[in-house]
Image: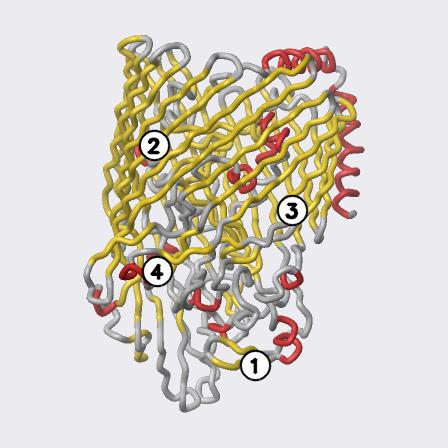
Amino acid sequence: MNLLLCFLFVLSVSSVLAQRDSLRPATHEVEVEDLLKRKGEIDEFEDIAIITTSRTNEQKSSKAPGTIVVITAEQIQRRGYTSLMELLQDIPNVRVDNLVDPRWNNNILIRGIVGANGSANDKFILLIDGVRANSPTNDIIPIVENYPVHLAKQVEIVFGPASALYGADAFAGVINIITKTADDIRRSEVTAIGGMYGYAFGNLQMGRRINEDLSYTFSAQYHYDKQPQLSKFYPEEYKNLEQNLQSGTFNTIFGPQTANVSPYYSQTPLQSYAMHGNVRYKNLSFTLFRNEAINPSTIAQTPDNVVYNRGAFFGHNVTMGNLIFQKNINKWQLTSFLIGSHYWLNPESNFRNVYSGLRPAYKFSNGLMLKAEQLASYTLNSVINFSGGITYEYFNSVPRGHDLEYALSNRKQRAVIIGSIYPLNPAGIEVPIPFIEYSNIGGFLQTQITPIEKLAITLGSRYDVNSRYGASLNPRAGIVFEINKYLNTKLLYGSAFLAPSPLFAFEQFGSFVSFDNGANYVSFFFRLPNPDLKPQTIQTFESSTSFNNGKNFRANFNAFYSISEGLFNYGPDFLNGNRYNGQFLGYPVNFIEVAINSERQFSYGGSLDLEYRWNISNNQRLNTYASVSYVNGKVTSKDNSNQEILINLAGISPWIVKTGFELELSRLTFSPRLIWLNEQYTYAVSQRENGTVRQKISGYALLNLHLNYRVSNYFNVFLQGRNLLDQRYYSLNLGASPETAIQGAAGAEFGNGAPQNPLRLMAGLNVKF
């Protein structure tokens, strides 16, 4: 109700501004004219122009050297997407696992590429108008309602490695949110949604052209989700929840532990917000973007090993600002960037689980990037175009480190390892907070040649030198051939590198115990930094064939084969340089592990995408779409005798089917969407077939719906349904291991997969003014 009242206040104030805007000529008439024009063209598939595959010039998606999916503002509206996660759920060759990780909530896998720690959100870069908007130092953050899809003119998703253009971390693909300009926003717009289990959501967008030279846009979005109490829907998984909280005694994987806890269940809600503002003056553009996402740090963990009380959460925040100047001089097109970006982990972020003695264990982390970049494009003639750029980046980072006794507000405070305070050492064991500084210089050059009208050839490469992990060269090549006006084909090669982020290279945690009240300490386990970790690399070969009949049907088939090397994993320190010699801070440690480059991966697959549009009558239309995706492959590992073996990929469902339709019946739009996954391959290895296959959990079918009624051109009401089949289904968490329990931190997680939300209904309204 408070959120709705805030929006009504904004609505009343902005309506006054809208009256002033109405003095501008032909607003209503232009909107109606554009609406009729749009209805007349809706049956024809437009060859949408994109910029992500070039960075300097727009290209038609059919001609661009990449495997591309574009979701337009109209599709976002008709399908009712409120988050980037929800949008990506419907994209071919993308798998979304929600509520699977206590650190960052969800995993978004592109073409089956995932990390040893179950991370996938760091395998691609996320851009807003071509500028990186995820963590600048590639800390892993949730992708939920913290990105402004409501402000998107279109979302460009480019599959495959793209370091030849973007440098580090464009490993599995690039997601670029192209925002609306003031000219695209004819009227200010507000949306408010409320739903089951304490769900509240709202956003606002507005824009105005002040004069020929000056314009602005602004948007804000807020999301609060109390979440269903999953113990009521999965009683077997949560059978000890209330008993543990009321007694204060937990039967953990390490035996009974007691804790001072609230006797009542109180899960931390999911929360997020995003704010985006842009001012354009002639050729100069200034953008400020800020977001935050908060998720419970109890996600996917069993009630015997974690305290389900409010206050156990992780909060991730990104603030990004950029200044962009564009200038065309004869055949030259110049674009200059100045960018600053800051990542911040809320210092109250903490775990409260079996590894912290069921007490809050606080985490501290932040990262900064300052970047200057100059891009240039030169059109020699109608056949040859050159583009290139040079980049300088400065980074500093405090990587997420030890489990701490107290929350820190800055890195200069005294950091104490949790559980190290004893009578003979009341101050505990202090640990240093690492501060990493490094820089990167990179440059790329690309040429696009069109020797004949139907043939386009792209050749390019980028070279980067990083002061922390060295140099990297990443070439790129593509051939696009138009067989006829309906059919074209692409042959592509790309390479990329995933930088060893400070999070992965310098992550450290563990605990000490004293058997003599703090006179001496010993540890059973620590993970400690490996500053010599090198980048992962990937090479991908792919092809695609597209058919478009020029009116109402199109189909695309693509296939890929990728080779990844130097994949990050963990190994014992004594076999990987013995940097720590069995000690940390002068105390003995039974086992120390470090991050290493140890694996190779071979992956392959593809997808078939179909779309058909039917103009039933003047105001009745049907748009249907369907995709079938396949991904599989092998990754190298070591068996008990230290011999290399090949194992199935982890974190995948080989077959995924996604389908839906958008039915417009005059004022009513009906948009159901179905996602089906076959069996899911866990991160744990089965003992069958000599340990070369993954354990598996069942797949699922997920039906979502958006139903919209247009009361007028300026007012809509709608209903949304998620998991309409009310399935009790499970997604892949790191600890999923139905055959045998796994070791390590994931051993405290659900072995049969992470339970997912039941059926949820939401209702909302959208007002333009």
Horizontal and vertical percent for residue 582? 26, 75
| Pair 3/4: label in front | 4
Q: Residue at x 35, y 26 (%)?
A: 544
Question: For residue 392, what is the image quadrant?
Answer: top left
**Relative to the observer, which residue lies in front, 561 or 394?**
561
**Mark 4 closeness class: few <14, some 14–19, many ≥20 residues within 10 Å:** many
- Of the residues under marks 1 and 2, which one precedes in the sequence? 1
- The answer for how far apart the CA atoms under marks 2 and 4 are is 27 Å
| Pair 4/1: label in front | 4
Q: Which residue is mark 1?
A: 258
Q: Which residue is mark 2?
A: 559
495 to 53, vertically: above or below: below
Horizontal and vertical percent for residue 476? 27, 30
Q: Which residue is mark 4?
A: 685
Q: Which residue is mark 3?
A: 223
The secondary element bearing badge 4 is classed as strand
Say whether residue 695 is left or right of residue 302: left
Say whether residue 479 is left or right of residue 742: left
| Pair 3/2: label in front | 2
- Of the residues under marks 3 and 2, which one precedes in the sequence? 3
- The answer for how far apart the CA atoms under marks 3 and 4 are is 38 Å
Horizontal and vertical percent for residue 304? 55, 73
Q: Residue at x 51, y 76 (%)?
A: 252
The secondary element bearing badge 2 is classed as strand
500 to 150, vertically: above or below: below
Q: Residue at x 57, y 38 (%)?
A: 674
- Of the residues under marks 2 and 4, which one precedes in the sequence? 2
* Any part of residue 153 in sight: yes
Q: Residue at x 56, y 57 (%)?
A: 755
